[in-house]
Amino acid sequence: MSQKLKIALPKGSLQDPTIKLLEQAGFNVHLSSRGLRPDSDDEDLDIYLIRAQEIGRYLSQGFLDCGITGLDWASAHDSNLVDLAELPYSRATVRPTKWVLVVPMDSPIQSVKDLEGKRIATEGVEITEAYLKKHGVTADVEYSWGATEVKVPDLVDAIVDVTETGSSIRANNLRIVDTLLTSFPHFYGSKKAYDDDWKRQKMDRMVLMLKAALEARGKVGLKMNLPENSLQAVLDTLPSLRRPTVSRLADINDGENWVAVETIIKDSVARDLIPDLKEHGAEGIIEYPISKIVL
């Protein structure tokens, strides 16, 4: 019987971007409309779809081998986990998730010290309690089941909530007092699984491909031919990921030596760069998509 790697993927707001990243890395995950045990084209994987808040706990208890969840949710269990990689993607943007202390715009609370004896609502109870303990502040922290922004100031004095852009906070006439934690998803392994040679190798190989997929985001490949006497001008123009590859083309008996140049650039600069390359004498310019870059 072949071995299986039990991996947890986050259910909820991170679900779709996580599955998309896995597909870009070469691991195709197939979901049913209501199932929590997705299939995969990798027979080594036994996949569980679990809320991100619970993944760290199940890993630390050894029920699962590895999983993807936020640094924020895993922080309470990090002594029992192996942090294999930070994966810089998020639910809505490329920005990290931030846990922030928020109060009404006209609140007298200006710093964490002003929370002494106050009431705070949050979904991240452990995160908030650790923050208060760090600053030597005693406050009443209650779990919020949602719609946290509407609870201040009538029900609580402050909230600790998650944001990427801050737009919802501003829309509700609230202000940020402090940032408790900045978090991207991470790929974690249980210590028990990481001590197993086969599971450790499987996790390391998955991490390599996930990081390669993330590295390729927003980048494209560029190929072109040009006269050798234009090479330096083109090299001075290219914002390459590494040194461009330059190779000599076969002689075409016209008395002029030509070279081929290949490089990787950010997609955002291609529209301005390609006309410049054309002006430097480049021909046969090809822009092509990249799915993975292994550094």
Image: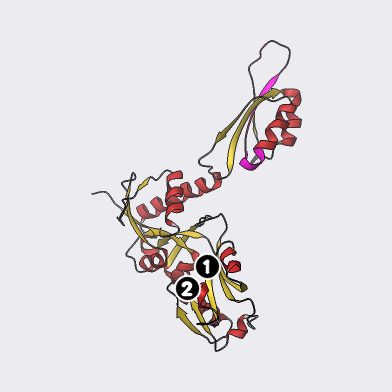
* Any part of residue 228 in sight: yes
Q: Are marks 2 and 1 in contact (CB under 8 Å)?
A: yes
The colour scheme applied to this rendered structure is secondary structure
Q: Which residues are magenta?
A: 248-270
Residue lying at 52% horizontally and 67% vertically, measured from the top left: 162
Residue type indicated by callout 1: Val
Q: Nearer the viewer, residue 66 or 118?
A: 118
The kind of secondary structure element at disc 2 is loop
Residue lying at 36% horizontally and 66% vertically, measured from the top left: 58
Where residue 251 sits: x, y (%)? 66, 14
Q: Is residue 192 magenta?
A: no
Residue lying at 68% horizontally and 32% vertically, measured from the top left: 274
Q: Give the mark count.
A: 2
Q: Is residue 251 magenta?
A: yes
Among numbered discs 2 and 1, the one appearing first in the sequence: 2
Residue lying at 62% horizontally and 84% vertically, measured from the top left: 113
Residue type indicated by callout 2: Gly
Residue 262 shown left or right of residue 126 in the figure:
right
Where residue 82 sits: x, y (%)? 44, 63
The kind of secondary structure element at disc 1 is strand
Q: Nearer the viewer, residue 52 or 79?
A: 52
Residue 232 shown left or right of residue 291 in the figure:
right
- Give the residue number, with chain letter if any, for mark 1: 162
Mark 2, residues whose alpha carbon is within 10 Å: few (<14), some, or many (≥20)? some
Q: Quadrant of residue 164?
A: bottom right
Mark 1, residues whose alpha carbon is within 10 Å: few (<14), some, or many (≥20)? many
Q: Quadrant of the C terminus?
A: top right
Classify 196 as above or below 130.
above
Q: Which mark is residue 124?
A: 2
